[in-house]
Each structure stands twice: as C-alpha cells, then as structure tokens.
Amino acid sequence: MRRPAVLSLLAATTALTLAFAAPTRAAEDAVVIPAPAVDAAPASGIQTAVIAGGCFWGVQGVFQHTAGVVNAVSGYAGGTKATADYQTVSSGRTGHAESVEIKYDPKKISYGKILQIYFSVAHDPTQLNRQGPDTGTQYRSAIFTTSDEQKKVAEAYIAQLNGAKVFSKPIATKVGALEAFYPAEAYHQDYLTLHPNQPYIAYNDLPKVENLKKLFADNYIEKPTLVSASKATN
C-alpha cells in the first residue's frame, strides 16, 4: 500500500497508467498447498479470525469473495488504541499490523480453510516485515488468535507446511493472541471493490481474487460481501 501522499499521486495518474497494457501477474504468485491436517472442531454461531498479510486492501478483498464469510473489515492489530490510525501505523513504530477481522459461519467454512486461503492466495507468508512493494513491520505476516484452539490449529498448520516444504523459504508468519482489533478508516473499507482500476490494486490485489476463484472454486463467490452492505443491514 502506498502512503497517503502517494495515494493522491496514484489517483491523479490512474488514467495515464491505464493507457498502457495492464500487468498480467501479481507481485506474488499463488501457491497450491495442502489443507490443514488439524482444524478447529465444529462450532455454532459466528466466529472471528484476525489475520495480517501486508496491505489490508487485498487481504480484505480476497475474503470478501469467500463463501461463508459474513464480514471482513480492514483494521489494525498488535498495538494500542491511541496509535490505531493509518498515518501513525504507517510509521512502522506502533506495533500494529495492517490486519483483517473476518467474521465467518463455521458451518460453511472452517478456520483451517480460512488459513489455507490466507497462506495460498492472500499473501506470501515467507516475506519478513514486507509484502510485495510494501515494507515495514506494519506489513508483517501474522495470525492473531482468539482462542487456544485457533493457536493450536495455526501453529500445527505452519509446522505442516514447513515440513512439506511447499514454499521455497520458511514461513515467517508469527502467531500470537489477539489483544484488540481496531477497524481502519472508512476510506480503506471495500477498497478493492471500489477502486479496481487503481494501478496498485490492478497489479497486486486483483490477481489474488482471480487465484481464489481458480484454486478455491468451491469457496469463491462472485459478489463480494462488503462492509458497506453489512452496515446497511445492521
């Protein structure tokens, strides 16, 4: 993700950029990986998963196209409420990671399947404190668990994937307990859907949604589940 000043520059130059051929591949390619050998037990009621994998625009966009997800909100986790704003988080000194809070129906999608999509198409889990063109601890790969069971599933899955050597490098994803999640500013929500022609989105994020459709066809939905729609029905 670009900083605020650069975001303005990108918006101003979008038309010029689109005059040229659009990129045909994402900054990070998807990786076909096995499903987790250990998954969460069947549960009732809406569950919560919080993950971080670089710029939250793309991660949110992927899970808004995932069946069983009832809401996916971009925000910040890992720091305090006082520093949970975009400009401050962008300093890389707050402890926050750009994150996505996923509310999901466990009868339609499991926690393990969410992690499989996260590791496979939503980001590159081998990158340390960066993702694609974005660098800094705010772009780190992290799983913020809400229960001991989630911690067990996440750690077992990372060990499974590392053991199978499905990635060319060890997974850098850190697993830790969620202390709090703070929703990001309104202009960050539904960003991929609202700005599909923005160069950053077109190059880095839209291919992730296409990879979701290709690799997880049974979990893909064409119409995204938007934050704005969720607010309208509440």
Image: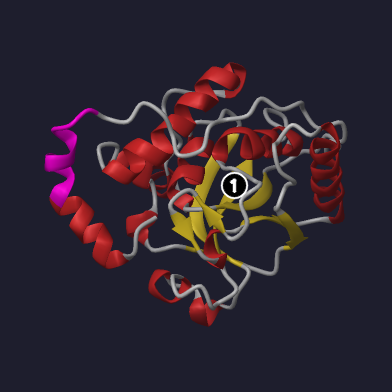
Q: Nearer the viewer, residue 155 or 77?
A: 155
Q: Secondary structure at mark 1?
A: strand
Residue at 38% from the left image edge and 63% from the top image edge? 185
Which residue sits furthest front?
168
Disc 1 crowd, CA 10 A, few/some/many (<14, 14-19, 20+)? many
- Asked if residue 88 is positioned above or below residue 75 in the image, the reply reads below
- Asked if residue 62 is positioned above or below residue 94 in the image, the reply reads above
Left or right: where does residue 145 sit relative to residue 88?
Answer: right
Residue at 54% from the left image edge and 57% from the top image edge? 130
Q: Nearer the viewer, residue 29 or 184?
A: 29
Residue 134, given in percent of the width and then of the height, sits at 45, 56
Q: Quadrant of the N terminus?
A: bottom left
- Residue type at mark 1: give it: Ile
Q: Main secondary structure of the magenta part?
A: helix
Dividing the picture into quadrants, the one containing residue 94 is: bottom right
**Residue 86 seen in render:** yes
Left or right: where does residue 199 sit relative to residue 119?
Answer: left
Q: Nearer the viewer, residue 15 or 213?
A: 15
**Residue 145 seen in render:** no
Residue at 18% from the left image edge and 40% from the top image edge? 17
Left or right: where does residue 193 sit relative to residue 21?
Answer: right
Q: Is residue 98 magenta?
A: no
Residue 13, given in percent of the width and then of the height, sits at 15, 49
Residue that mark 1 sits on: 102
Residue at 36% from the left image edge and 26% from the top image edge? 24
Residue 155, given in percent of the width and then of the height, sits at 83, 49
- Asked if residue 108 is positioned above or below residue 85 in the image, the reply reads above
| Magenta residues, start to end | 13-21
